[in-house]
Image (cartoon, helix red, strand yellow):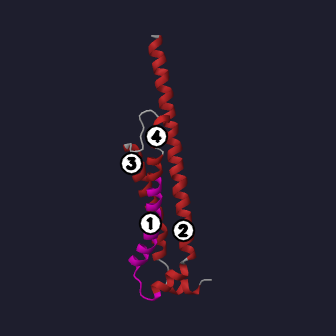
Amino acid sequence: MQAFHNRSLELWAVQSGGRAFLVFGVFALLLAVVGLYGVKSYIVSQRTREIGIRLALGAKRPDILRLVVGNGARLIGAGIAIGIAASFALQRLVSSLLFGVTAADAAAGFAVVILAAVAMLACYLPALRATRVSPLNALRSE
């Protein structure tokens, strides 16, 4: 009975640690998304006059959307490429610290996909707001 109790206690400790890492991971993802949204929103607000001029000269709303989201996608792609390169470079260190975890782990790949999708959403919302800019109001601003 004592061995069963020790195992269940060990299992509880591991599960609690896993839950804590999950909560911290979700919180880190939330912070990253809020930060990215804030930066993209600020950049779009700084380019309001330029976007208004583009719209006044005949740019279509999908062109503006593509411009803003494309800029964010390039930044996200560069960050993912640097992160993947760093994970493979540090693979030996990671595998020595964590049992059964490698840089090419499926969960890590899933995390990259989730982060990229959420980051694209954080770029899409300011881009959508940029497409609603009235050229006349944008030219009058500042």
| Front residue of 47 and 100 | 100
The number of numbered discs placed on residues in the rendered structure image is: 4
Q: Which residue is mark 3?
A: 110
Q: Amino acid at mark 3?
A: Phe
How crowded pointer 2 is (Cα within 10 Å; few <14, some 14-19, many 20+) is rated as many
Give the SS element for disc 2. helix
Q: Which residue is mark 1?
A: 74
Q: What's the residue type where badge 1 is placed?
A: Arg
Residue at the location (48% across, 62% down)? 122
Do tag 4 and tag 3 residues touch (Cβ < 8 Å)?
no
The residue tagged 2 is: 41
Q: Are marks 4 and 2 in contact (CB under 8 Å)?
A: no
Q: Residue at x 44, y 15 (%)?
A: 4
Residue mark closest to the camera, 1 vs 3:
1
Foreground mark, 4 or 2? 4
Which is more foreground, mark 4 or mark 3? 4
Q: Which residue is mark 4?
A: 92
CA gap between label 4 and label 2 equals 39 Å
Calculate the distance from the C-alpha at mark 2 to the C-alpha at mark 3.
Answer: 27 Å
Three-letter code for the amino acid on which mark 2 is drawn: Ser
